[in-house]
Amino acid sequence: MTSASDGSAGTPQELDLDEQIAIYQREYPEVDPQVEKIVTALGRLNRRMNVGYSRHLSAVGITSAEWEVLKALVVVGRPYRLGPGDLAKRLGLTPAAMTHRIDRMVSEGLVTRERDERNRVRVIVELTDLGRSKWLETMRMASAFEADLLQDLAPDERNVLGDLLTRLLRRVEADQPDAGGRLTDLD
């Protein structure tokens, strides 16, 4: 890490990608600079996107954990309902963690939790009007943020990038099918 060049002494700043790769090559000559540049850029981009999304979510008044639940409920379609176990599996959470998250969201009015009328043993989590409103507001903010993020890419470049990233993702998902959720080997 270097000091910022704007005179703010002691303020840490990330190295330029090429500088960082050069240091990696100096310290580990076997590193493939092309691969390292791609994965480092993806990592930095992911971190900055997460910070940006977190700021937008905070402005809307929800957490990223709540956002994940709202998305999962919207994805299943109307009437936006799932059992807590199904939600936990989709989000890679333990049942206890899912229960805690649902408790918080019920108290905030984002979801309801009711007994299934057809099977009184089963519980159903359903998106409320407020939860859907928060989802829509977040989608609007995210769409603007994402458009700004990709503004320097022409439509054909966006298509190529999307295709390349999708191809990478498919291979990683095939090699690591459990990596989308909770990893049992990390417990």
Image: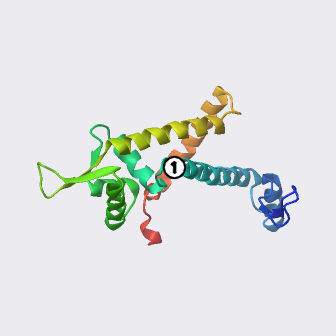
- The residue lying at 42 percent from left, 62 percent from top is 182
Quadrant in the picture for the N terminus:
bottom right
**Render colour scheme:** rainbow
Residue 98: percent from left, percent from top: 34, 61
Disc 1 is placed on an element classified as: helix
- The residue lying at 45 percent from left, 70 percent from top is 185
Question: Between 175 and 154, which is closer to the camera in this rendering?
Answer: 154
Q: Which residue is mark 1?
A: 57
Question: Between 45 and 125, which is closer to the camera in this rendering?
Answer: 125
- The residue lying at 47 percent from left, 55 percent from top is 63
* Quarter-of-image position of residue 36: bottom right
- The residue lying at 79 percent from left, 64 percent from top is 11
Residue 181: percent from left, percent from top: 43, 58
Callout 1, which amino acid? Leu
Q: Number of callouts in the render?
A: 1
| Circle 1 residues within 10 Å: few <14, some 14–19, many ≥20 | many
Q: Can you say whether 127 is above or below 4 in the image?
A: above
Q: Can you say whether 186 is above or below 71 in the image?
A: below
Say left or right for 160 vs 129: right
Residue 134: percent from left, percent from top: 43, 43
Query: Which residue is at the far bottom?
Result: 187
Residue 20: percent from left, percent from top: 79, 59
